[in-house]
């Protein structure tokens, strides 16, 4: 498996990442202050920390809590920054589709990732042609996609505009329950790397994600964002999102 950088991926959607970083940094300072305590109040420090410095597990736990808070703060800030955006949970259900295998879904994701070159390629009609999936609009025409059964769970596949004036579309595949591990990380990683995608990982303390990136014309980049079960040696994938945005730098 190709070497992977363990850094938070720089993206054009930098507002979300910046807010996450600020919140996590602030909470980390709070954790450190709690661990050290005021230098002149030794009794208070012993009472608070029971005379022991925080363990690595304690620090990691606080980092995870901070990451969750940061994610919520970033979501709220993004919603306010783009008032025309619609919260995903507000969408009506997707049309029912056929039972599929994970292999069919992986092949669809890889085909799209390898072939998309412009934002027009991510329009619902073209997505249907490339993926081979029989997508249809939801009851309000806000998302196009389908949902159905897998061997040990369910899938949802959707295409939508992040907000009304956005020039492109977002494509997302979600698999539940994540514990079933219907989608393996390796099945996506290997063909994407072979197709020339660069790979970075989210930093420890953030939700475990792997970012695959391919440079396109006109300063754009195609990003395949994969939500995994863990940071180190991920095995299972619960969500795959494709986005085309301006590249940083």
Image (cartoon, rainbow, N blue to C red):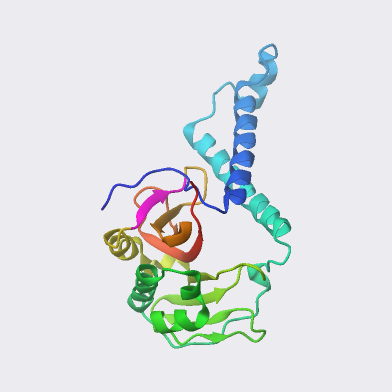
In depth, the one of 185 and 241 nearer the eye is 241
Chief SS of the magenta region: strand
Counting from the top left corner in percent of width and height, residue 63 is at 55, 40
What segment is highlighted magenta in the picture? 197-202
Residue 33 seen in render: yes
- Compared across the picture, whether 172 is left or right of 43 comes to left
In depth, the one of 26 and 126 nearer the eye is 126
Up the image or down, 34 lies above or below 150; here it is above
Residue at 34%, 47% (x, y): give it: 4
Quadrant of res 152: bottom left
Number of marks in picture: 0
Counting from the top left corner in percent of width and height, residue 120 is at 50, 74
Residue at 70%, 60% (x, y): give it: 82
- Compared across the picture, whether 203 is left or right of 193 comes to right
Quadrant of res 235: bottom left
Counting from the top left corner in percent of width and height, residue 191 is at 29, 64
Residue at 46%, 52% (x, y): give it: 208
Up the image or down, 59 lies above or below 160; here it is above
Counting from the top left corner in percent of width and height, residue 52 is at 55, 23
Up the image or down, 222 lies above or below 43; here it is below
Outermost residue, top side = 40
**Magenta-colored stretch includes residue 140:** no
Residue at 55%, 69% (x, y): give it: 168
Residue 223 seen in render: no
Quadrant of res 211: bottom left
């Amino acid at each position: 498996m190709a070497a992977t950088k363990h850094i938070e991926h720089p993206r054009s959607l930098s507002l979300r990442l910046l807010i996450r970083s600020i919140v996590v940094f602030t909470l980390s300072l709070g954790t450190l202050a709690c661990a050290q305590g005021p230098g002149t109040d030794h009794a208070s420090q012993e009472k608070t920390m029971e005379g022991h410095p925080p363990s690595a597990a304690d620090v990691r736990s606080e980092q995870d809590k901070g990451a969750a808070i940061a994610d919520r703060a970033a979501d709220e800030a993004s919603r306010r920054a783009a008032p025309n955006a619609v919260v995903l949970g507000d969408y009506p259900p997707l049309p029912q589709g056929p039972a599929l295998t994970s292999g069919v879904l992986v092949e669809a994701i890889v085909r799209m990732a390898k072939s998309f070159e412009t934002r027009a390629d991510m329009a619902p009609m073209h997505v249907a042609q490339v993926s081979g999936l029989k997508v249809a609009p939801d009851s309000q025409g806000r998302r196009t996609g389908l949902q159905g059964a897998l061997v040990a769970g369910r899938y949802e596949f959707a295409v939508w505009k992040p907000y009304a004036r956005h020039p492109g579309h977002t494509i997302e595949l979600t698999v539940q329950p994540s514990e079933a591990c219907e989608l393996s990380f390796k099945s996506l990683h290997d063909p994407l790397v072979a197709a020339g995608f660069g790979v970075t990982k989210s930093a420890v303390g953030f939700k475990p994600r792997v970012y695959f990136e391919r440079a396109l014309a006109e300063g754009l980049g195609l990003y395949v964002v994969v939500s995994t079960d863990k940071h180190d040696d991920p095995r299972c994938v619960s969500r795959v999102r494709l986005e085309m945005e301006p590249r940083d730098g």
